[in-house]
Image: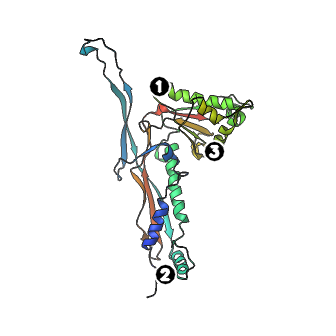
Amino acid sequence: MSIRHDAPLRKEDLLAIESVLYEAKADELVARSIARVNTNFPPFAGEIGYDWYTRKGSAKILASGGGAKDIPFVGEEGGRETMKVYNIVTGIRYTIEERQAIQAKNALGKGPSVQLDTLRVTTARRFVAEAENKLFFVGDSKHGIKGILNKTGITSENVATTGTGSTDADKRLWANKTPKQILADLLKAKEAIEAGGLFKARVLVLAPVSRLKLALPYSDYSPLTIQKWLETEGAYFEKIVESRAMLSAYNGLSANAFAMLDNDPEVVELAVPEELTLREPVYDLLGTSEQAVVERSAGPIIRHPGAIYVGKGV
């Protein structure tokens, strides 16, 4: 029996697409390396809601025989936050000519084991991941989504003008600062987060160019790098993450920046009612197959903006 080379996508083709699409790549999933993903929402939800709060109350030491009226009670004060859910969508398309060419090669024993070129599947996955990262860090101004870099209530300020240069902008650049001055910027951020004793500065997010600065020697007289100094002197971060979202071209802050935060799930999560999903293929009259790749997200859930610090101008 002859084999049709113009047939629709075969089961093997669909499995190959899915295996590539759902292959997690750590370098793409930057937001997920920082915040826990919260999928505890209906996949069809049009909006999500969550409560933010600050704790109130205290515990009291009472002498034996103290009365009930002396007992303090704990409570909360805060509010309700609602966020709309949006689709992150891209598509994968194969023309009938592309399928015929690959399948013809396979019939001659000269084609790949996978029937289709899965490069565009990899591209689709990466584009969705980049959109997810954008939502987490900077949100989307068109849809009114705020990210961790611009959420109301976070501390966002210029770093100190302690470097060299003729303008304040020059003096803020880490390229013009000594290692000690760079450390001072980081320690100021850490103090802003941890001063109240409620949060810990667990994660430091840097642009790639800023990340390289941590490899500088602490001083001419010390073999320690800036990063080693941070680790040995108690200013340790559980994670130091690189992200292009810290670059001025992406962050909407008009300058390179760094972010520092407590990433405990009680502080920040990533809301994803529906994980990355490959929809069923649809064919047009010419036999072109099209498949939508969809994720549904509302961006970051930020219950305690005070646990996030953004230093601008580095």
Name the disc covering residue 236, or none. Answer: none
Q: Which residue is mark 3?
A: 208
The mark closer to the camera, 1 or 3, is 1
Q: Position of residue 231 (x, y in %)?
A: 59, 33
Q: How many marks?
A: 3
Q: CA distance from mark 2 to mark 1?
A: 67 Å
Q: CA distance from mark 2 to mark 3?
A: 47 Å
Q: Which residue is mark 2?
A: 5
Mark 1, residues whose alpha carbon is within 10 Å: few (<14), some, or many (≥20)?
few
Q: Amino acid at mark 3?
A: Pro
Q: CA distance from mark 1 to mark 3?
A: 30 Å
Which numbered disc, 2 or 1, marks the residue that appears first in the sequence? Answer: 2
Q: Residue at x 45, y 37 (%)?
A: 264
Q: In the displayed structure, would residue 130 be above or below residue 308?
A: below
Q: Say which of 261 and 133 sits in front.
A: 261
Which numbered disc, 2 or 3, marks the residue that appears first in the sequence? Answer: 2
Which numbered disc, 1 or 3, marks the residue that appears first in the sequence? Answer: 1
Q: Amino acid at mark 2?
A: His
Q: Residue furthest bottom?
A: 1
Q: Say which of 202 and 56 sits in front.
A: 202
Q: In the displayed structure, would residue 194 be above or below residue 6?
A: above
Q: Is residue 236 visible?
A: yes
Q: Amino acid at mark 1?
A: Gly
Q: Position of residue 199 (x, y in %)?
A: 47, 30
**Image quadrant of residue 81?**
top left
Secondary structure of the residue carrying tag 3 is helix
Secondary structure of the residue carrying tag 1 is loop
The mark closer to the camera, 2 or 1, is 1
Q: Which residue is mark 1?
A: 197
Q: Residue at x 28, y 14 (%)?
A: 70
